[in-house]
């Protein structure tokens, strides 16, 4: 047997989107990034300034928008840089940092979406007790819990991944330092790591999803008991935006992370990745604002206030 090169790698190379249309990609993703930042900042500003939106449902939405801003900022600025430069290297520490914040913020979003479903469950199934159960303090505790859970779970997972030896290929065939492509580069048996990734994905994807599923089973059962069709539609309409957001986020995350994967990354995986790291954060402000009359009116009021003072 040949002697293995045990020199630890100090940098990786991100392949990104291999194409001769890099300037076009730069313009497209820059526009998407700006729209995402502006959309989520408008949501945050509107909920903060409008007292009528200081209910748990909208406070959770504000936390979600803040998470989306950080979430897209972990990957897209680096992608924009790579579209314009031939040198696509990223340091070992830089890759670990990007992957940590990506996992941390993704985990936070999973739990935030679950707590938003719980909020709708309490509002629809226990309306008389809603104000005593879902207080502002409880909303803050659940939001903070989502962030702390993301911080701790991701720290454990990333520490485990980057304790592996990396001493052979340093080419990451992806648009960012995602966990599975990084693990595949390790010059060691990664079976245990792939199982750990599967367990981590099950915990941060399946557990919140089960909470969402149970919440909506109870919500649907309660809505079906409402005698009038108009009443059923009005009650369930408050869940429409959340259901759309959950379907988009969990659909793409499940396809990518709830399986072990030893084969090489292919273009389909990159496209799916772009959906949940770029396009969904852009769509969420539109989903929640276009389907919610209260938010649309509040945005108009905030706009009028800003114009008046300027």
Image (cartoon, rainbow, N blue to C red):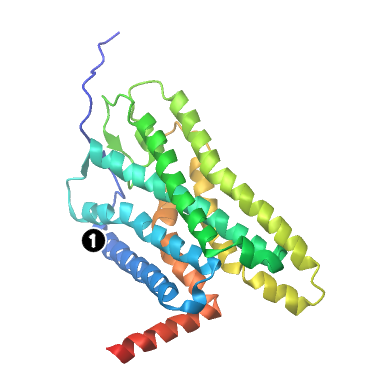
Picture layout, residue 36 above or below residue 306: above
The residue pinned by badge 1 equals 23
Visible in this render: residue 266? no
Q: Position of residue 149 (x, y in %)?
A: 46, 45
Visible in this render: residue 238? yes
Which of 154/262 is in front? 154
At horizontal 45% and vertical 61% (from top left) the residue drawn is 64
Picture layout, residue 153 above or below residue 8: below
| Quadrant assignment for the N terminus | top left
Picture layout, residue 292 above or below residue 216: below
Which of 108/257 is in front? 108
Which of 199/183 is in front? 199
Q: Where is residue 271 in the image (x, y as percent from the top left)?
A: 42, 52
- Report the number of discs: 1
Q: How crowded is mark 1: few (under 14 residues within 10 Å), some or many (20 or more)?
A: few
Q: Where is residue 233 in the image (x, y as percent from the top left)?
A: 70, 74
At horizontal 24% and vertical 38% (from top left) the residue drawn is 93
At horizontal 47% and vertical 81% (from top left) the residue drawn is 298
Q: Position of residue 154 (x, y in %)?
A: 41, 40
Which of 77/46 is in front? 46
At horizontal 38% and vertical 89% (from top left) the residue drawn is 304
In the rendered image, the residue lying farthest to the bottom is 308
In the rendered image, the residue lying farthest to the top is 1
Secondary structure beneath label 1: helix
Picture layout, residue 116 above or below residue 235: above
| Quadrant assignment for the C terminus | bottom left
């Amino acid at each position: 047997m040949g002697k293995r090169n045990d020199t630890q790698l100090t940098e990786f190379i991100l392949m990104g989107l291999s194409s001769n249309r890099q300037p076009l990609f730069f313009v497209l993703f820059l526009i998407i990034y700006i729209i995402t930042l502006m959309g989520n900042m408008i949501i945050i500003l509107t909920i903060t300034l409008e007292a009528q939106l200081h209910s748990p449902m909208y406070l959770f939405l504000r936390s979600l928008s803040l998470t989306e801003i950080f979430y897209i900022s972990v990957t897209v600025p680096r992608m924009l840089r790579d579209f314009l430069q031939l040198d696509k290297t990223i340091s070992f520490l830089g890759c670990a940092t990007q992957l940590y914040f990506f996992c941390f913020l993704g985990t936070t979003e999973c739990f935030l979406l679950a707590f938003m479903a719980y909020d709708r469950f309490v509002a629809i199934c226990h309306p008389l007790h809603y104000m005593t159960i879902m207080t502002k303090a409880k909303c803050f505790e659940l939001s903070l819990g989502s962030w702390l859970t993301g911080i701790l779970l991701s720290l454990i997972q990333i520490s485990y991944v980057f304790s592996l030896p990396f001493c052979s290929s340093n080419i990451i065939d992806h648009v960012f330092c995602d966990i599975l492509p990084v693990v595949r580069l390790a010059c060691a048996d990664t079976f245990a790591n792939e199982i750990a990734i599967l367990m981590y994905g099950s915990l941060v994807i399946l557990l919140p999803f089960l909470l969402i599923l149970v919440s909506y089973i109870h919500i649907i059962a309660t809505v079906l008991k409402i005698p009038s069709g108009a009443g059923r539609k009005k009650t369930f309409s408050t869940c429409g935006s959340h259901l759309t957001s959950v379907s988009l986020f969990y659909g793409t995350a499940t396809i990518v992370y709830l399986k072990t994967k030893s084969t090489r990354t292919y273009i389909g995986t990159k496209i799916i990745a772009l959906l949940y790291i770029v396009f969904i954060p852009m769509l969420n402000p539109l989903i929640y604002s276009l389907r919610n009359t209260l938010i649309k009116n509040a945005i108009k009021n905030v706009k009028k206030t800003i114009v008046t003072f300027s």
